[in-house]
Structures are given as C-alpha cells and as structure tokens.
Amino acid sequence: MTFSEILDRVGSMGPFQFLHVAILSIPILNMANHNLLQIFTAATPPHHCRPPPNASAGPWVLPMGPNGKPERCLRFVHLPNASLPNDTQRATEPCLDGWVYNSTGDTIVTEWDLVCNSNKMKEMAQSIFMAGILIGGLVLGDLSDRFGRRPILTGSYLLLAASGSGAAFSPSLHSYFVFRFLCGCGISGIVLSTIILNVEWVPTRMRALATTITGYFYTFGQFILPGLAYAIPQWRWLQLTVSIPFFVFFLSSWWTPESIRWLVLSGKSSKALKILRRVAAFNGKKEEGQRLSLEELKHNLQKEMSLAKAKYSASDLFRTPMLRRVTFCLSLAWFATGFAYYGLAMGVEEFGVNLYILQVIFGGVDIPAKFITVLSLSYVGRHTTEAASLLLAGGAILALTLVPLDMQILRTVLAVFGKGCLSSSFSCLFLYTSELYPTVIRQTGMGASNMWTRVGSMLAPLVKITGEVQPFIPNVIFGITALLGGSAALFLPETLNRPLPETIEDLEKWSLRAEEPKQEPEAEKASQMIPLQPYGPSLGSS
C-alpha cells in the first residue's frame, strides 16, 4: 500500500481536500500583489526641476531636450538680475533644489527623489526584493527539511506580514531595502511549503487540476493589484494594505496539517496517524481511519520512503552525460524565462499606456496562455512547447526594438504577446523539470532550476539601467537571452507519455533508446501532471 492508497481510505477528494486547497490558495491570490507591487509603489511620474528659492514668482522656463520635451534633470542657471531665457543657449545645471512631480499620489520615487542620477536605486529596490526570494529559497528549503513544512509556512506568513508592514513605515530608503528583502524571503518560504502541502493531500489524478487552480489564484491576483493601486494612490497605505491579510493567513495556517511523509521520515509516525484519523473523520470516514494502525502505516510507507532517505547532492546533477545536458539546458531555460519575464513585467510604464489598464491586460494574458499551454503539453509535447514559448518570446521582445516609440498600440501588443509566451514557458518548465530529473534527485534539480530563475529575475532590473546608454539595449539583452534559452530547450529529450525516471540510470537509458515512446496508463500519465506553474514566476515560483 502506498500513501495514495492510504489517502483513498481516509478520503482523497472529500470536504477536507476542498478546504485544504482553498486555505493554501487564497494567500496566493494576494502574493501577486507583493511580486509586482513596485510597478505602482515605484512608478515615476512626470517631473521637472524645482525653481531656486530666490527665483521670481513668475513662470519658470525649462530647457528643452533633444526630443523636444522639457528636460527632467536640468534647469537653467539662475541669475537674479537676468531676464527669463527665451532660447536654449543659456548654461544649465542639475536640479539642486529637488523636483516637482506632476502626480496626485506618491511613490517611493517621489518621496526619496529616485530620479535622474538616483533612478538606479529604484531598480536596485526590485533586485534586492528578488535577492530575498533567492536567499529565502536556499535557507528556508533546508529549514523545511529539518523542522517541517507547516512551521515554515506559518513562519513565512508572519515574516511577510511583519516585513511588508515594516516597509510601509520605513523611515529611509535603506530600511525599505531591508524590509523588502525580508518580504522576498517570506514569499519564498510560502511557495516552497505550499507546493508540497497542496500536492500531497490530493489524489494523483487530481494533482494537475489542484495545482492549476492554485496557479489561477495567482493570475487573478494580478487583477486585484491595479484596482487597489488606483483606489490607494499613497504607496505606504498600499504597501500596508497588501501586507495586513498575511496576519490572517498566519492564524488560518494553524489548521493546515503537516506533511505525512515528512512526519514518517522524521520518526513522528504517531503524530502522522493522528492527522490521518482526523482527516478521515472530517471526510466522514471515521471508522476507516480508526482501523489504521501505527505498524501498518510504517510498513506500508517504508518502500515509498526508501528513495527519499538516499543521500544525493547538487554534484549528482552533473554525474552523467545526459544529466549534464539536462541540467545545463534547463538552467539556461529557467534563467532566460525569469530574466525576460520580469524585464517585461516590471517595465509596463515604459509603453506610454495607462498603467492600471495595461497591468490588467498583462495579468489577463496568463489565462489563455496557461490554457493553451496545457493543451500543447498534452498533444504536442513538452520539448516543442518549451522551445516555441521562449523562441516566440525572444522574437517579440527583439521586435520591440524595431517599433518606433510613438506606435504605442503595436508595442503593447508585442509586449503582451511576449509576456504570455513567458508565462507559458514557466508553466511548461515546472512540469518538464519534474519529469526530466529522476526521483532520487528531483527535489535537488527543481531547487537548482528555481535558483536560476530567481537569479534571472534579480538581474533583470539591473539590466534595465543600461537603457540610460541607449533605450533599446535592455530589450536586445532580454530578447537574445530568451532566444538562447529556447535554443537550449531544443536539446532536451521529450517526456510526453514516458514513465517518470526513478534512478539516474533510467534517465541515461533515454539517450540510448531509438524506439517510439510507449503509451502509458492514464493513472501514470496523470501522475506526471505536477505542478503547472502554480504560483507565478517568483517563485517564483513556484
């Protein structure tokens, strides 16, 4: 008897599972707000130099830039006895007295003057947040193996709630950086624990559906953020609004049961038995739960846990030729996806379209993208779907460099199409990676892959700074990287209708087989459908 069969005895699709998935999914609805929050809290409104204190009360003339628009970072040198300049020949100087912002709301940019020579700090803030997600994944992943999934989930909710609220009361930019870094750590812990706890308590045949439903919570969360930002134009109140709900999630997480597999592996089988009996009673199968015994639980899960007890390290990802190819190609694909995704997602204000409407469109494209991806994965295959997603995204981003800035609609269409393709790539990669790596190193492989997408998302805001040299440079870098990632995916083996590899030797045999893949039973095919980019790219995610 496996854990899936034990789960069937206590109820695999009863009221407990519906409530369990709901409790885990609702926080994901609000997690998108934190991932993309700086689109609004760090928006840069139109601005110009503030006149000197001793300037006359009359109109203040600004120097004109090469594009025919007033300069944002320069002003004419003020001479008290001179008349107002009518030409552009007079000497200019930086904005020595600050800036005037044409905005009804406020952002971290307007509060701490993150414009002109200081505009790099705005991108740095997002990179620090992404660095928190990266470090959090490395640290909290290890702590999760030591102390359990639920304590890390509960602690991560509290960390995100506290650090997010702390960011709302930041007295300085540097303290804001610290709190945003901690927010990233909290998000990473939430994603890690939610994936495991969500998948474990539903039957194998329903894993794809459960994770896809949770993934759509993240997608719909992207619709909530523009509405909140429009209703709350003050960045501190907006930051606080998206953080407070996690105090509630912290309290509700105490109802979430611990991972049964982790409890058995940690020698806490008696506690695992109590949880199974509680689930059985909740699902109306109390008598069936009472018939489960401690000895039966240990005996039946012993074989299933044997592979998990084997010690493997990251170096095993490079042990054989096929593993080296898989690791290299997947790492490049993950990096390219996270890198290009956040390059587009965090640059919506550059397209000259209403920021709130464009963010709704950017979020809405994920709905058809994920649906098309599921169909493509099932009928076309993982290999073709992943390569096509990145190649099309790279082509769309590069095309942006050829479209004039005044053609806003065409530029927006290309950006939305590229973002949809990258969302499709994320969905495919979560499933593809879990199928390519053997069971004995699957968790290690997934962890390494997620690390690379976090590195990409951390570097993306820094690359956008190169736009100060030439505006087209960031999109050229994002586009070429996506094309390289898509090209690398072409060298990966197809996994459609293949059984999951259990050992490293199983994977090596794939490179030696010339026959067509055999059709597998529906139950085994369903077991492969895990998890379809459940929590967005942060996760990252996920």
Image (cartoon, rainbow, N blue to C red):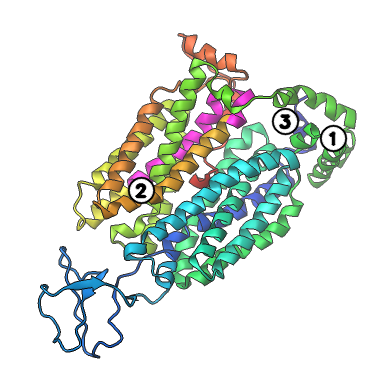
Residue 269's disc is 1
Q: Nearer the viewer, mark 2 or mark 3?
A: 2
Is residue 275 positioned above or below 388 on the image? below
| Disc 3 target residue | 4
434 within the magenta span: yes
Q: Residues within 10 Å of mark 3 (few under 14, many from 20)?
A: some
Tell me whether circle 3 and circle 1 mark residues in contact (CB < 8 Å): no
Principal SS element in the magenta part? helix
Question: x%, y% of residue 166?
Answer: 59, 66
> If you read the primary sequence from the N terminus, does the residue marked by circle 3 or circle 1 appear first?
3
163 within the magenta span: no
Describe the element under mark 2 as helix, strand or loop: helix
From the viewer's perspective, tell me whether residue 287 is left or right of residue 349.
Answer: right
User: What's the residue type where badge 2 is placed?
Assistant: Val
User: Magenta region: which residues?
Assistant: 416-444
User: Which residue corresponds to the image point at 71% horizontal and 38% vertical from the top-left?
Assistant: 145
Q: Nearer the viewer, residue 430 or 485?
A: 485
Q: Nearer the viewer, mark 2 or mark 1?
A: 2
> If you read the primary sequence from the N terminus, does the residue marked by circle 2 or circle 3 appear first?
3
Q: Nearer the viewer, residue 490 or 177?
A: 177
From the viewer's perspective, tell me whether residue 262 is left or right of residue 59.
Answer: right
Q: CA distance from mark 2 to mark 3?
A: 46 Å
User: Which residue corresponds to the image point at 51% horizontal and 58% vertical from the top-left?
Assistant: 33
User: Which residue corresponds to the image point at 87% horizontal and 37% vertical from the top-left?
Assistant: 270
| Disc 2 target residue | 463
Q: CA distance from mark 3 to mark 1?
A: 17 Å
On the rendered image, what quadrant is the N terminus found in?
top right
On the rendered image, what quadrant is the C terminus found in?
top right
User: What's the residue type where badge 1 is placed?
Assistant: Ser
Residue 37's disc is none
